Amino acid sequence: MSNEAAKPSVEEVKTNFIYQEIDKDLAQGKNGGKILTRFPPEPNGYLHIGHAKSICLNFGIAKHYKAACNLRFDDTNPTKEEVEYVDSIQEDIRWLGFEWEGEPRYASDYFEQLYQWAVLLIKKGKAYVCELNAEQIAAQKGTPTTPGQDSPFRNRSVEENLDLFERMRKGEFKDGEKILRAKIDMASPNMHMRDPIMYRIIHRHHHRTGDQWCIYPMYDFTHGQSDFIEGITHSICTLEFEVHRPLYNWFLDQILDGEDAPAVRPRQIEFARLNLNYTVMSKRKLLELVQKGIVSGWDDPRMPTISGLRRRGYTPESIRMFADRVGVARRDNVIDLALLEYCVREDLNKRAMRVNAVLDPVKVVITNYPEGQVEMMETVNNPEDETMGTRELPFSREIYIERDDFMEEPPKKYFRLGPGREVRLKSAYIIKCEDYKKDADGRVSEIHCSYYPDSRSGADTSGIKVKGTLHWVSAAHAVDAEIRLYDRLFMDEAPDAHKDKDFKDFLNPESLSTLKGCKLEPFLAGVKPLDHFQFQRLGYFSADKDSRPDALVFNKTVGLKDSWARSNK
């Protein structure tokens, strides 16, 4: 992990209430001055931009306090978890620029200890085996304003509960036939305290423990205890876990009752999760998009997943910048997607090489340029960074320009090419349109121009002044490419906020447009997947992971300006 990658900004530290709370704990001498955080994803899907904020926060805290951050997979549900997700999560964290303490940890590492603690709660009369199904439990739990009803199995003897729980572990019962519940308070105003489920039966192969277990602890019984086992000092969670905190504390109180005070007991602090407009952040809904083929996969560039953003051309620096700008709030809010796009635009403006690409080409023949002649034109790689130097572009008699850079009857303030009009070709010559041809469909098929030999860029003695500058590609040297243009995946600002409609009803049918036969300068023939560039005047683009030298594919990352937001006001 680089020193700068995880380092929070000075402003973030000043305004972040979590840092302020940790400072108070340190001032009071809690945990012996120790700080240890963790990032605890469930391996049931790919990480998205909301997780990126949490990653930056937890690893940033560790960096600021010269401490460590664990990576722990809360792998308690084998029906939804896969090794693919475990691998992708590790890849995403490292790509963002972070490294966890030691080897990755797993809640499944603690299954035996969790089982023994469950047995302890049974012996203390604080847990019982129940035979109600999910619908029956929901019905007898009551409402936030009315108390629930006791399960008919709530007063089983300790001996009977121990016997049944052991038999559950041995696999004597079917899925759903029995569960283990905590015995707390069926009249509690906190619904999570009304005898929550601790264990359920799942006869399913686990990605790490195989078939060793057929009972699995619930997330709420696992999460806090795993933090305790690892010695986590500050358990940073999103706001939806605030109402779970009393339950986590209750479990630890029962487990530690009568024991000496532990050296470290996790303190949970909640912050607002990241919500983006025109986006869904539910892993269940993102999985549905993948399974139904609405997107090409978890790393589809239209997805808000970290892998999707990476494939689209976002940089880790831009995502960390975004997390820093969003900050940490106490209340849920919705962030404009334009801020994320602004961050990647700011970052790529500094680092991306400027190249020539023509997405909708029309041929220009420079009639007075010698046939067969090729000149090499020097051009700046990035005017924002002189250290990136220059390169040479081949220039010849026939070139390609963008179709919309020519108009037969241009308006007065149109500064591009038209009959009798002059423009500069960037890093090359000034040309003048003399004539043009059309095809059978009435489209302009070829433009004939003359050039001024004494107008070469950097050595112009022509005295001609022009207002327009166009990018171009030499026809003889151009390489073909497929270009994929992306728009927002959803047309509604909050696609999953409509109770009477399915979130998929708001899908944007024009979220992906594919252009074939685009013409690129020859330098781009040697690009590697995920290399990023600024296509002159068009935006920022990245080579797709499937791009090959003989079949170039580029994804549009973001435009040069936030034109989408303006056009949709």
Image: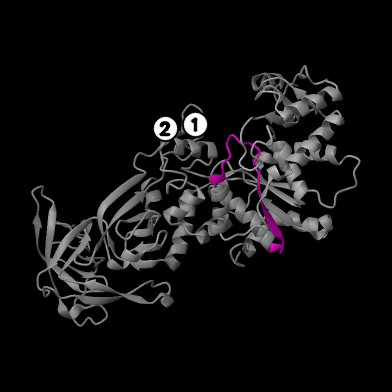
- Does 9 sit above or below residue 360? below
Q: Is disc 1 in contact with disc 2, using a CB cutoff of under 8 Å?
A: yes
Question: Is-magenta flag for residue 161?
Answer: no
Q: Which amino acid does label 1 sit on?
A: His
Residue 85's spot in the image, x, y percent? 55, 45
**What residue is pinned by disc 2?**
505
Q: Is residue 449 left or right of residue 58?
A: left
Q: Earlier in the sequence, mark 1 or mark 2?
A: 1
Residue shown at the point (75%, 57%) measured from the top left: 35
Location of residue 371 (image quadrant) = bottom left
Residue 342 placement, left or right of 50: left
Where disc 2 sits, the SS reads: helix
Q: Based on the displayed image, in which of its 4 quarters is residue 197 positioned? A: top right
Residue found 71% across the figure and 64% down from its top? 66
Residue span colored magenta = 64-84
- Alpha carbon distance from label 1 to label 2: 10 Å
